[in-house]
Amino acid sequence: MSLQRSSDELVGYDEAMERFDVVLGLEVHVELGTASKMWCGCSTEFGGEPNTRTCPVCLGLPGSLPVVNRKAVESAIRIGLSLGCEIAQWCRFARKQYFYPDMPKNYQISQYDEPIAFDGRVELEVDGVGYEVPIERAHMEEDAGKSLHVGGSTGRIQGSDHSLMDYNRAGVPLVEIVTRPIRGTGARGPEVARAYMAHLRDMVRALGVSQGRMEQGQLRCDANVSLMPKGSDELGTRTETKNVNSLRSVEAALRYEIRRQGAVLAGGGRVEQETRMWNEAGGFTTAGRSKEQAEDYRYFPEPDLIPLAPGREWVAELRASLPEMPSAKRSRLQSEWGFSDLEMRDVIGNEGALDLIEATVAAGCDPVAARKWWLTELARAANEQGVALEELAISPVQVAQVQELVEAGTVNDRLARTVIEGVLAGEGAPGRIVEARGLAVVSDEGALTAAVDAVIEANPDVAARIRGGRTQAVGALIGAVMRQLGGKADARRVRELITARLS
Ligand code: ADP
Ligand code: MG
Ligand code: ZN
């Protein structure tokens, strides 16, 4: 953890919102989950002994030549189509030159003025309000390696003795998705940015082009933001906070920058155009380098690669085979299940719940019951165990089986919860647990009637009140019958029996 603190002045977020309009720009890198790298056959797998997944091409050795990974191009086109982009008829790769020790060729192969996909848009909903994020482009490029800064045992508080280079990640295919300036989000800007990131994550997962794990750097966001005085139409100077790698941090970093820029501008100062770093532990940004211009990179068409001309038939095929997008799926399931907006929002708000409920319903469960189990009992269990819903030791099929036992009258809701506990504890299938733990409700009418009669006899005064019309007193007798049967009875049936006896 850094000892560095931010000494920035901040205004209150609401105060900034009263005086300024927010403009956002998001640049998101998606690491593609292709088996091999962008220009060579090396594995892209995460981790591994440093420098074991390298070859002359991804190490940039003289005489080695890159070859385009068709699967990566296909993934880029599918991402572009899912963003509503047009796909270029013809496009080229470009060299972007700058020195960075983790970039062995001393230049990055990227795309410049001819991206593979351009002019798209993403529609989002945040708390019931719709927003549109205009997409400028999605282009292909290669990832760099990693520097590891080690040592530092020389008595200094900060800093390292030396750096080591790991080129395993060098040449892993990336798609960078760049928005146009996003306006009109009002105070919701940081939340819209977060929702956009979540959308991209769900989208790349649905496409199967990346696992979209932010904590592993498979999805990284550079978050640009500027402020302009209310009523002004001229874009302000932006800052770009680099490599923010969680949904929460995207929102938090933007909120921080808005408050910081708000203070600078309110004090009559000027915002510096610069990159900034997000300090996760401290919850603030710090200044990075002042921003270079595109000219500084000396882009020129990559001479070792021929242009790409994705065939129109291929593009049409890819378009036809796109999976249903997560937002479309959400609306479809909401209407199929008959959930209100509020109910659906609870489902979406619980990571993984949508798919689990869908699978539970597919296993024959009523949607309302499926929602109830996953969002109450199981959400609580996941919370207690500190795991995600899908990591719980119960499958959607088993949840459907529990509900089946409830509907068949074998167990009541309370016993069903005990059955679920048993499944979570690894005691086997719901039906087995009912037998093993003796959880089935007493459905034998003779036994039920006997219990009801015994309770009425033991509580003559209550029985008399019910006979006299005080029907709310039935509750006391139901409770007594349930106790007598160890909670293993269907309360509705018990009520019916008591009422029948006393009327
Ligand atoms: P760079 O390559 O320098 O990062 P780009 O133009 O590729 O610049 O991307 C910058 C991002 O910031 C884009 O998403 C763009 O839409 C957005 N952007 C541009 N100008 C502004 C501004 N004044 N305020 C906020 N965002 C901006
Ligand atoms: Mg950038
Ligand atoms: Zn290689």
Image (tube, rainbow, N blue to C red):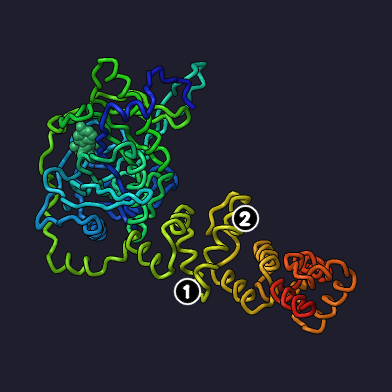
Label 1 amino acid?
Answer: Ala
Write down the residue under mark 2: 381
What is the x, y in percent for residue 71? Answer: 26, 60
Decide: is 228 above or below 267: below
Across and down, in percent, residue 5 comes to 44, 20
Q: Count numbered badges in the picture.
A: 2
Image position of 224 with respect to 398: above or below: above
Q: Residue furthest right?
A: 458
Which residue, given by chain and number where applicable, does mark 1 sit on? 362
Residue 311 found in image quarter: bottom left
Q: Secondary structure at mark 2?
A: helix
Residue 107 visible in this rendered orientation of the protein: no
Q: Are marks 2 and 1 in contact (CB under 8 Å)?
A: no
> Which is more toward the observer, 410 or 470?
470
Earlier along the polypeptide chain: callout 2 or callout 1? 1
- In this view, the residue farthest toward the front is 468
Q: Residue 392 location in percent, x, y?
A: 58, 59
What residue lies at 32% left-to-right and 39% top-to-bottom?
189
How would you rate the neighbour count of disc 1 (Cα within 10 Å): few for under 14, some for 14-19, many for 20 or more?
some
Q: Nearer the viewer, residue 107 or 262?
A: 262
Disc 2 crowd rating (10 Å Cα; few below 14, some 14-19, many 20+) is: some
Q: Secondary structure at mark 1?
A: helix
Q: Nearer the viewer, residue 164 or 129?
A: 129
The numbered mark at residue 446 is none
Instruction: Report which quarter residue 149 is drawn in.
Output: top left
Q: Assign the C terminus to one quadrant of the image.
A: bottom right
Seen in the image, is 107 located left or right of residue 286? Answer: left
Question: What separation in Å lies between label 2 and label 1 (alpha carbons)?
Answer: 23 Å
Residue in view at x 31 percent, y 28 percent: 18
Q: Position of residue 81 (x, y in %)?
A: 21, 59
Would residue 1 appear left or right of 416 to someone viewing this image?
left
Q: Is mark 2 within 8 Å of ligand 1?
A: no
